[in-house]
């Protein structure tokens, strides 16, 4: 057989797709079964969320309304709601509840009793300890310091020897002055004898009067010389005594500023030592010019004579005002007001036997000006200030209510204040919680028993509305209710459905 001739294959060109907008792909259509399943799941999720919200909010609402956990069963909750409609609201303070009948609940406050006491009037000030005498001991003569006979910080007495200067040159000067004085004294005596002879010869008319007058003038000249010599001798003796440096006042010596062997001069600025008198010692302080008049009156009443020295008590405290450094008396008041500060300087004197006060030390001063006897006092926190003035809240006996009463404030201390008018001793006033009170408000005092407390059956509180309703609902259930399956909470149902 002859092979067939194969015809060449021809391929038709692929038609080109015209360019145009790309259409979106069609979404697959869900079946009816899938839609039902999705709806069921959505309902199930909503039920779970609703049950969770009810579970979380039901205990808080029950505690706010009744103070006890809510019933676990839905039937009991429904019965409680039906048996006591609005019970929780009434117990919480509706117009028909007990709180609505009583008004605002009572406020717990602190109280204190007004009493009669003596109140001291004290002026507080900041003072500076000032010694009565501060002496810088300087040498009166120049020379070599030979001995130092004191210890730094030592207490010395007036006249006590502190140091010595080399006295040899001053001893020589004293001997020279003494010798010259003896020589001139001898010349004076010789001139006096000669003058007496001249007077005898003049009486016998054996000598001229001029010679007598000349001899008398010589005697007077020698008398003057003798007086000068005595002064020179006294100066030399005084300079010799200055070689012994003694303490001019009693007090405490400071640090030594010169050593043995140095040449000291009268012009040395630092001198040999500084002595400060510390017992007794003064405290200088300033008081306000408005208090100067009151202090002047107290000075007159304390002494019995205006302007006389009083015996007002002054206490010096340390920097923290917790330790008393000493007790003294008021000494004096300055005679003018400082125009720059508006204060008057005052001074108090302290014995300082325990040496607790140190020169130039800053202390807190308390000056007892006067004492108010048998006045009505209350704590400072009891007196309040309003637009109409000062007032207090007074407790009205056993009613446990308060009344606003205007008072007049007097002198005050750290924790007490004097009530000069408007309050009697023995009345109780509010000291804490007054910012929440009004006139006629009910209060609870410390130590009061809770309301409703008693003995026996009265010790129980009245059953709340929710509990009463729950009990009534439980009694109303059928006898076979216990055998019936209980309805689960939405959360439990959702959990069961999910499993």
Image (cartoon, helix red, strand yellow):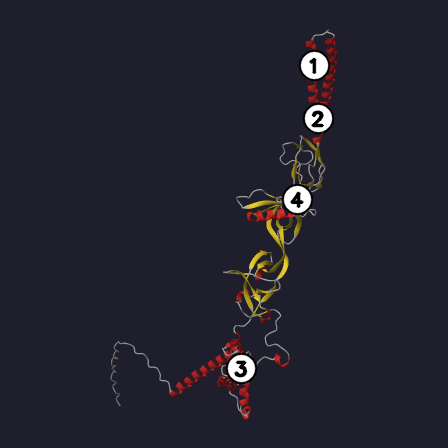
Q: Which residue is mark 1?
A: 216
Q: Name the front one of labels 4 and 2.
A: 4
Q: CA distance from mark 3 to mark 1?
A: 141 Å
| Mark 3 or 1: the one toward you | 1
The local secondary structure at tag 4 comes to strand
* Residue 499, x across and y down, in percent: 50, 85
Labels 3 and 1 touching (C-beta < 8 A): no
Farthest residue to the top: give it.
206
Give whichever of discs 1 and 2 has the lower sequence position: 1
Q: Which residue is mark 3?
A: 465
x then y, percent, for residue 195: 72, 13
Q: Which residue is mark 2?
A: 234
Regarding residue 158, the answer to whether it shows in the image is: yes
Q: Nearer the viewer, residue 281 or 1?
A: 281
The residue identified by callout 4 is 281
Q: Of tags 4 and 1, which is closer to the observer?
A: 1
Residue 220, given in percent of the width and then of the height, sits at 69, 17
């Amino acid at each position: 057989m002859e092979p067939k001739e194969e015809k060449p294959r021809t391929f038709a060109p692929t038609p080109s797709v015209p360019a145009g907008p790309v259409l979106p792909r069609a979404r697959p259509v869900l079946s009816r079964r899938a839609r039902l399943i999705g709806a069921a799941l959505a309902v199930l999720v909503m039920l779970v969320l609703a049950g969770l919200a009810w579970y979380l909010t039901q205990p808080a609402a029950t505690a706010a309304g009744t103070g006890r956990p809510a019933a676990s069963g839905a039937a009991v909750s429904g019965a409680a709601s039906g048996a006591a409609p609005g019970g929780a609201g009434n117990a919480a303070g509706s117009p028909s509840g007990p709180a609505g009948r009583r008004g605002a609940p009572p406020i717990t406050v602190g109280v204190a009793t007004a009493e009669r006491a003596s109140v001291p009037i004290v002026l507080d000030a900041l003072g500076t300890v000032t010694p009565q005498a501060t002496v810088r001991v300087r040498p009166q003569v120049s020379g070599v310091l030979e001995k130092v006979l004191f210890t730094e910080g030592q207490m010395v007495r007036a006249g006590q020897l502190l140091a010595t200067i080399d006295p040899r040159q001053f001893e020589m000067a004293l001997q020279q002055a003494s010798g010259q004085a003896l020589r001139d004294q001898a010349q004076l005596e010789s001139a006096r004898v000669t003058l007496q002879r001249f007077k005898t010869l003049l009486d016998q008319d054996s000598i001229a009067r001029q010679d007598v007058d000349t001899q008398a003038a010589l005697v007077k000249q020698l008398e003057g010389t003798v007086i000068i010599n005595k002064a020179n001798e006294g100066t030399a003796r005084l300079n010799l005594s200055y070689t012994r440096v003694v303490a001019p006042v009693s007090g405490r010596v400071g640090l030594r500023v010169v050593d043995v062997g140095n040449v000291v001069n009268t012009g040395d600025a630092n001198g040999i030592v500084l002595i400060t008198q510390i017992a007794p010692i003064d405290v200088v302080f300033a008081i306000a010019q408005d208090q100067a008049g009151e202090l002047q009156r107290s000075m007159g009443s304390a002494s019995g004579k205006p302007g006389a020295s009083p015996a007002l008590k002054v206490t010096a405290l340390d920097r923290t005002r917790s330790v008393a450094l000493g007790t003294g008396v008021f000494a004096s008041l300055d005679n003018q007001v400082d125009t720059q500060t508006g204060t008057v300087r005052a001074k108090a004197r302290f014995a300082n036997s325990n040496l607790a006060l140190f020169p130039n030390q800053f202390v807190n001063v308390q000056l007892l000006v006067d004492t108010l006897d048998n006045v009505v006092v209350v704590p400072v926190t009891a007196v309040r200030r309003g637009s109409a003035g000062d007032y207090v809240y007074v407790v009205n006996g056993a009613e446990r209510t308060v009344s606003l009463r205007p008072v007049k404030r007097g002198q005050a201390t750290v924790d007490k204040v004097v009530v000069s008018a408007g309050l009697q001793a023995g009345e109780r006033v509010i000291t804490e919680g007054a910012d929440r009170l009004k006139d006629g408000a009910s209060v609870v005092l410390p130590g009061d028993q809770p309301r409703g407390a008693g003995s026996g059956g009265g010790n129980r509180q009245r059953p709340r509305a929710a509990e009463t309703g729950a009990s009534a609902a439980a009694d109303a259930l059928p006898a076979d209710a216990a055998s019936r399956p209980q309805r689960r909470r939405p959360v439990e149902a959702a959990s069961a459905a999910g499993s």
